Amino acid sequence: MPHLITIAADRNIPLIEDACAELGSLRMYDVRDEESLRNALAGADALLCRSTIRVDERLLGGTHVRFVATATSGTDHFDIPWMEAAGIAWASAAGSNARSVAEWFAAVLLEMHMRGHVDLHKTDVGIVGVGHVGSQVADVAHAFGLPVVLNDPPREERGERPLPWSDTSFSPFAAALGCRICTLHTPLTAMGAHPTRHMISSAQLSELPTGALLVNAARGAVLDADAAMRWRREGEGRLAFDVFPDEPAVDPPLVAAADIATPHVAGHALDGKLLGTQMVYDALCAWLGHPATWRHESRLPDAGELSIPAGHRASTASEDEASPAGKGDAAAAENASSRTVAADDPLREVHAVVLQACPLLRDDASFRATMPLPPDARAAAFKSLRAEYPVRREFRRFRIRTNAFSAEASQILQGLEFKYM
């Protein structure tokens, strides 16, 4: 048994107290309260955090912290050169929320299809950045039967195979920009052979097809926000964002320009969060030389069963016209987008199920409601929307009944990893 240590831990890392109880004394902090963070760090040996704080000399200089782990995938909030020079070991939960982000992307595609802005029966997807998240996004595209164009110069230069289940090769950046849907899943870098900061600016936007959908769930500064707003204002295409420059100080005009905007919650499914907790715990155990015995799988609650709401089942045109649901079902009436696709489109059913599992429109509405607030209050609201995000589960945790859906919808839902009863 190792010497017990003092651990400063973000209270928004789920079950971190349960996981690390045997390793030492935990001091929980609220990232929105700087005093609680300072108090937690006083005398701490390890820091367990999320991407909501900047870990650098200003934060840790003069402290006893010698190990830092983030329960999120990215590490751009770490000053890694300083940490390593200071002898501070570090770890991340790379890939923990990849499936969650990919499922958010699936919800975006379906909602934009239902609005008539993209046609998922005849489109292609350019994926820029084919790491943990981009690979899962490719899997989602495959479930819809969409061809993909994969762009990832660093991986290509290393001679890596893009996808384990496909022979698709890497393609040039321009090829990804030529797709009707282009989605960004790169880290944010300003240096090196392939910097990503503002990798999408006016020149790249002009290469997108007219009416294209551009999705950013990577980092806000990967995209030139001013150029994107001009592009959208000029009617060239559509935008869907989960990330924004200068978070939490999000610019209201950028949110207004987006067809879909969510407050950096694409990766917030509980399953991915608990996997992040597991990875942080495992890394801390490895640093301490302590056996890792806590397992997050046993803590996951049952997600339950999903069914298709009335009025969303694909039907023939005559059936739709004759049925009460076709003449004013409340749920269908509230979802005006459902009137833009054919009555017999199986994606109606898929859309209805996916948006129950991933409540995209709820998140969009709650985010937009904060935009009229003064800047400080708006930034605080952004943090709260993330910190107090309601429980969401990955698709594979839900059960659905085979006989409740058309054959085409069932095939897509199975491809998206929903479990059949």
Image: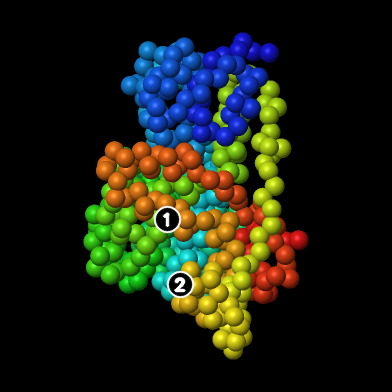
Give the position of the C terminus as an image quadrant: bottom right
Residue at the image point whose x is 36% and y is 16% from the top: 61
Which label was assigned to residue 336?
2
Give the position of the N terminus as an image quadrant: top right
Q: Residue pushed farthest right? A: 421
Per the model, the C-alpha gap separating discs 1 and 2 is 16 Å
Is 280 located above or below residue 275 in the figure? above
Percent coordinates x, y for residue 127 in the rendering: 45, 58
- Total numbered labels placed on residues in the image: 2
Where disc 1 sits, the SS reads: helix
* Residue where numbered disc 1 is placed: 364
Is 58 located above or below residue 128 in the figure? above
Residue 176 left/right relative to 131: left
Percent coordinates x, y for residue 337 in the rendering: 46, 71
Percent coordinates x, y for residue 116 in the rendering: 43, 74
Where disc 2 sits, the SS reads: helix
Residue 267 left/right relative to 370: right
- Toward which corner of the image does residue 20 lie, by quadrant? top right
- Check disc 2 and give the amino acid type: Ala
Q: Nearer the viewer, residue 389 or 333?
A: 333
Q: Please tell me which of labels 1 and 2 falls first in the chain.
A: 2
Whether residue 408 appears in this view of the structure is yes
Q: Nearer the viewer, residue 141 or 278?
A: 278
Residue 307 left/right relative to 173: right
Percent coordinates x, y for residue 307 in the rendering: 66, 64
Characterize the local packing of mark 1: few (<14), some (14-19) or many (20 or more) Cα atoms within 10 angstroms: some
